[in-house]
Amino acid sequence: MSAPDPAATGPAAAGPTSPDPAATDLFGLVAYGELLAFDRLAADARLAPDLRRRAALSEMAAAEIAHYRWLTDRLAAWGVTPEEAMAPYVEALRAYHDSTEPRDWAEAVTKAYVGDAITDDFLRGIADGLAGPDRALLLDVLHDSRYAEFAGTEIRAAIEADPRAAGRLSMWARRLLGEALSQAGRVAAADRGALVALIGRTGGDVPGLLRRLTEAHAARMTAAGLNN
């Protein structure tokens, strides 16, 4: 994960003193997602089979809390209370993580590989409706390729060690897709219309975005050795 240039994307970056309400809503959504991701990765690290893997996941958790701070600093610079911005999305996002608790290391890294990638794709599709430093900061917060590469390598290693794991993890990944798409619907329902408006600014719509999420998911499943 790459750290953004504070001069370009930090809270002090040039930007509107009265932000687009859609931007504050999106920052609230992503900030709460980062806070939950920190909690989850810190807990999942304890499932790691060795210290190397535990350290890798712990480093990812540290990155998530740093991202949370970047987002809440920007909200505060706008005069928006982070708790207020995050509140509409608490129930929807918490429901997703509560319903997809991994039972072991292989399920934890599959959730990181599948679930987080779907979330990132969803947020990229929305962030495209923003411009300037706000869009740049959101894109910096999303996971880079190293994150997916680590998780994908762990999934393939689990399948190599036990070929029967492919079936179990494929079913788990399909469940994650279903829950993630349901989460997107819950987020849209909890939103005040701002996120849908952002998608519309790109010339797209929610069904089209969800269709693209499903197509990208299928490609990731194949790359990790899982069945659609």
Image: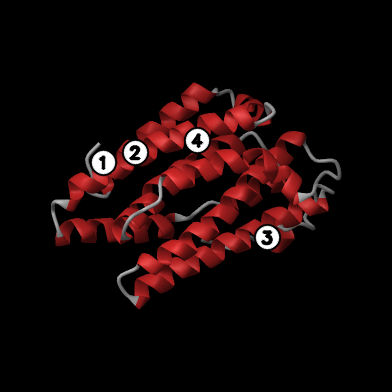
Disc 2 element: helix
| Residue at which label 1 appears | 171
Residue 63, position as x, y percentages in the image: 55, 64
Of the image marks 3 and 2, the number of the one nearer the N terminus = 3
Is 93 placed left or right of 149 in the picture? Answer: right
Question: Which comes before the other along the chain, label 2 or label 4?
Answer: 2
Mark 4 sits on what residue?
A: 183
Residue in the picture at 22% in, 40% down? 227
Q: Which residue is mark 3?
A: 69
Amino acid type at image mark 4: Gln
- Which residue does the numbered mark 2 point to in the structure image? 175
Looking at numbered disc 1 in the image, what kind of residue is underneath it? Met
What is the spatial separation of the Cα atoms under label 3 and label 2, in whole angstroms? 31 Å
Q: Is residue 153 visible?
A: no
Give SS at disc 1.
helix
The reply to whether the C-beta atoms of the residues labelled 2 and 4 are less than 8 Å apart is no
**Mark 3 against mark 4, which lies toward the viewer?**
4
- Among the two numbered marks 3 and 4 on one chain, the one whose residue lies closer to the N terminus: 3
Q: Is residue 29 left or right of residue 14?
A: left
What secondary structure is found at the residue carrying circle 4?
Answer: helix
Q: Position of residue 82 (x, y in %)?
A: 74, 50
Identify which amino acid the numbered label 2 is placed on: Arg
Where is residue 48? Give x, y as percent: 34, 68
Label 1–label 2 contact, CB within 8 A: yes
CA–CA distance in space, label 3 to label 1: 35 Å
The quadrant of the rendering that contains the C terminus is top left
